[in-house]
Image: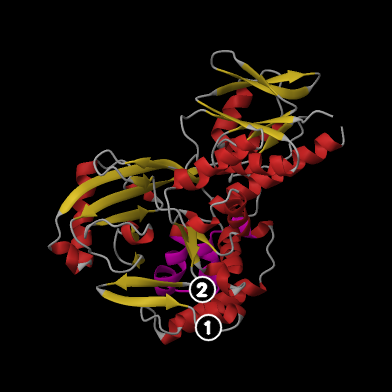
């Protein structure tokens, strides 16, 4: 029997993970990507002034991201990421540094112990937080928790504004790219159950050691093409092609038809629904909930200083617009001849997405100087901003209903993408999970034909 061919629309992590899993299942993927590069929302580029490869934004993963780590291993770049052995990171508040740092204790006790030396919260509020974590552990999740915000759930469970600001939202905002008074209790509870109430390493933070395009794009492309698959960039899909009631291909803006035995859409929800609108043979209410998927922006600010201003790899900052600051020079182990590249990651960045580069430079270089004494005398040699206006989908109240499963009622058509029903928020882990699930559905259906 000849090898069956599966078309994958989208060359982001979800699409590439789909392709890799399809190869593992004995199928031939053809990845079609509208942009000239792979990686989707996780990409890097060569900065025109410094000549170095920089990421569009600071991407991290945690130890609980098991399928992402397996994907990285499958494409042969697991030596190009690093993962801490347990949770630990410094937090700055009003010029005072304190650490959230797990001790060497068994299982979840290690993560709970991070509160012991955390000075930004008093003893009474630490007890409140422990009570909140215990309540999370005892909660059996169901759809009811998608109808209330995590903020409101925490208030009912004896949390106050100080614990929410100095602990809960410190984790929620960067993890879910949204404020705690917007995200659903379902997702907030899920996050803490997995990351902080599981094995020690689940909450540990990991980083790429090389640029994102090199990490998730180039190596995946090499594997896919070596295994007999194909990747075509610059292909903008405009409609699906059907034969005998089954999706068997896709057309682009020039009318070019690429045919296969099935199609996986690994595109954002809005692009997928637009594709269906232009596919006259597909009209199905199953896809309508995806129209309500909302997105949230991230703004990444890159600053190059002529000398080191940050000694740690990364820091969280409270009571400041800085949020999280990353020492990219140290994270990538680059020899910058004494200079330092800093990345400021702004999650839920509606306040900043429309500001000009000049305004952002004035605000954030001043804030860096206020927070880090070394930045007051350092010279800024380069400044740039990368805005990702639709960086992630929102996990706000009621969002579960908009997350569709990978298998659709349309024969031959499947869904991938971090926004689909993976049980995870908008992360690289969710993208990989969606790709694996979609590819497995295709393989099983093709085997049963």
Q: Position of residue 128 (x, y in %)?
A: 50, 80
The answer to whether residue 226 is above or below residue 365 is above
Q: Is residue 149 magenta?
A: yes
The colour mode here is secondary structure
* Mark closest to the chain's N terminus, 2 or 1: 2
Q: Quadrant of residue 263?
A: top right
| Callout 2–callout 1 Cβ contact below 8 Å | yes
Seen in the image, is 56 located left or right of residue 425?
Answer: left
Residue sitting farthest toward the bottom: 123
Q: Quadrant of the N terminus?
A: top right
Q: Is residue 205 magenta?
A: no
Residue 131 shows which numbered tag?
Answer: none
Q: Position of residue 367 (x, y in %)?
A: 22, 60
Main SS of the magenta segment? helix
Q: Quadrant of residue 187?
A: bottom right
| Mark pair 2, 1: CA separation | 8 Å
Q: Residue at x 51, y 72 (%)?
A: 85
- In front of the other: 367 or 449: 449
Residue sitting farthest toward the top: 255
Part of the protein shown in magenta: 145-173
Seen in the image, is 208 located left or right of residue 252?
Answer: left
Q: Quadrant of the C terminus?
A: top right
Residue sitting farthest toward the left: 377
| Circle 1: element type | loop
Q: Which residue is mark 1?
A: 104
Q: Position of residue 301 (x, y in %)?
A: 30, 50
Q: Which residue is mark 2?
A: 86
Q: Residue at x 38, y 77 (%)?
A: 99
The answer to whether residue 15 is above or below residue 82 is above
Q: Position of residue 291 (x, y in %)?
A: 58, 35
């Amino acid at each position: 029997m000849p090898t069956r061919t599966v078309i994958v629309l989208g060359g982001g992590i979800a699409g590439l993970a789909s392709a890799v899993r399809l190869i593992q299942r004995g199928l031939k993927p053809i990845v079609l990507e509208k942009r000239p590069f792979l990686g989707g929302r996780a990409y890097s580029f060569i900065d025109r002034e410094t000549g170095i490869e920089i990421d569009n934004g600071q991407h991290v993963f945690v130890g609980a991201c098991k399928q992402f780590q397996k994907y990285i291993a499958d494409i042969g770049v697991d030596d190009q990421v690093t993962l801490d052995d347990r949770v630990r990171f410094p937090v700055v508040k009003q010029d005072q540094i304190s650490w959230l740092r797990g001790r060497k204790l068994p299982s979840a006790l290690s993560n709970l112990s991070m509160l012991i030396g955390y000075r930004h919260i008093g003893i009474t509020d630490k007890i409140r937080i422990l009570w909140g974590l215990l309540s999370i552990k005892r909660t059996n999740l169901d759809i009811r928790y998608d109808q209330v915000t995590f903020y409101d759930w925490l208030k009912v469970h004896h949390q106050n504004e100080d614990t929410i600001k100095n602990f809960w939202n410190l984790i929620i905002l960067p993890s879910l790219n949204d404020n705690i008074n917007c995200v659903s209790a379902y997702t907030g509870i899920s996050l803490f159950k997995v990351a902080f109430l599981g094995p020690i390493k689940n909450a540990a933070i990991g980083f790429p050691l090389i640029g994102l395009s090199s990490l998730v794009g180039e190596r995946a492309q090499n594997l896919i093409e070596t295994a007999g698959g194909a990747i075509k960039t610059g292909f903008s899909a405009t409609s699906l092609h059907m034969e005998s009631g089954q999706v068997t291909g896709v057309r682009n803006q020039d009318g070019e038809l690429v045919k296969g035995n099935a199609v996986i859409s690994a595109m954002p929800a809005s692009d997928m629904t637009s594709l269906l609108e232009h596919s006259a043979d597909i009209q199905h209410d199953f896809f309508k909930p995806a129209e309500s998927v909302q997105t949230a922006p991230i703004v990444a600010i890159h600053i190059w200083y002529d000398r080191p201003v940050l000694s740690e790899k990364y820091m969280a900052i409270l009571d400041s617009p800085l949020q999280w600051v990353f020492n990219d020079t140290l994270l990538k182990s680059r020899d910058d001849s004494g200079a330092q590249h800093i990345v400021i990651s702004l999650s839920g960045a509606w306040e900043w997405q429309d500001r000009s580069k000049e305004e952002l430079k004035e605000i954030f270089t001043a804030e860096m100087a206020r927070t880090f004494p070394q930045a007051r005398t350092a010279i800024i040699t380069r400044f740039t901003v990368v805005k990702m206006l639709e960086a992630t989908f929102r996990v706000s109240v009621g969002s579960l209903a908009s997350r569709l499963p990978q298998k659709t009622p349309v024969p031959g058509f499947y869904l991938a993408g971090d926004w689909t029903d993976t049980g995870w928020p908008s992360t690289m882990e969710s993208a990989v999970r969606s790709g694996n699930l979609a590819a497995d559905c295709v393989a099983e259906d093709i085997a049963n034909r």
